[in-house]
Image (cartoon, grey):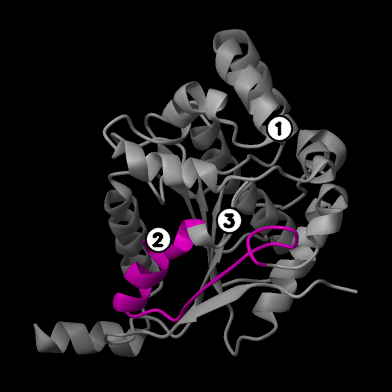
Amino acid sequence: MRPELEIFRRSPTGPRLCSHPIVLVHGAFTGAWCWNEHFLGYFADMGFETISFSLRGHGGSGGRDFRSLASIDDYVEDLEAVVATLDQLPVLVGHSMGGYVIQKYLEKHPARAAILMASVPPEGLLASNAMMAFSQPDLFLQMFWLQAIGPHTLLRDRLGRAMLSPDIASDEGMIYFGRLETESHRALMDMAGANPVFLSPLDAPPMLVVGARNDEIVPSEIVHRMATRYGADCIMVDHIAHAMMLDTHWQKVADAVLGWMEKNLADKTEKSGKQSAA
């Protein structure tokens, strides 16, 4: 039995840019709240029906007692349940683990487009974790302890610097950090090689891969390699860290994503209307 999911929906508040709704998929240790701070309202204001939701065991969704047993395929089922409520193919936007869930979803389902933000790559976490363990052992160790004990105050300094830029207000950063929670052990194992992505570039929808220039968790070489694999457009955003939807310059990311969608996804009727209005 699928747990009840926490779902947030925001209707467009401005002229509708695209008839295809945006579905936001969060990453590990978080919930829908990470999108609701900025992105949910931003894209609704820009003309999109926008939906965020918490994967089972996260945020306000059910299944917390069994979270450690949830697999990536379970998370894909959650995404399937949300998409099933829509009348149009979605534009899927995923961050970190959420990007991996989207890639697994696309193995079997179509979408209007996919936007992968600081995403776990299709080959999984082994390479990036090995790079981190070698070049930044302190960060690697703190990621381990985050999974083991949750967002303990002793982890906030080093792990906080990896997640958010140093110029974010300290109280704001502490609030975000305090909302993190442990992730499913099984899902992490899936991303470590137990459940790899087999999405062919030929089957992928129009895709944008977004990286953060200051990201210590998903470095730029992984971002570029993922974009090359899928033949996707790639944008690197300066002065921002891994948790790009919460960081100080989150709007630079949102604006870049919006610009790509305006160019590639805007409905023809809306495009012609904008041109005639100009």
Residue count near mark 3 (Cα–Cα under 10 Å), binned few <14, some 14–19, many ≥20: many
Q: Nearer the viewer, mark 1 or mark 3?
A: 1
Q: Is residue 144 magenta?
A: no
Q: Which residue is at the far left?
A: 278
Identify the residue under disc 2. 37
- As drawn, 122 above or below 141: below
Q: Disc 3 marks which residue?
A: 26
Q: Residue 40 bears which disc, if any? A: none
Name the kind of residue labelled 2 in the image: Glu
Q: Which dot, 3 or 2, sits closer to the camera?
A: 2
6 is higher (above) or lower (below) than 234: below
Residue underneath mark 1: 149
Which amino acid type is shown beneath numbered disc 1? Ile
- How far apart are the two marked residues, 1 and 3, measured between alpha carbons? 21 Å
Give the CA separation, mark 2 to mark 1: 25 Å
- The residue drawn where x is 37% and y is 83% is 267
Q: Is residue 19 left or right of residue 80?
A: left
Looking at the rendering, which quadrant does residue 215 occupy?
top left
Left or right: where 220 falls relative to 179 = left
User: Is residue 220 visible to us here?
Assistant: no
Element under disc 2: loop
Magenta stretch in the rendered image: 34-60
Q: Earlier in the sequence, mark 3 or mark 2?
A: 3
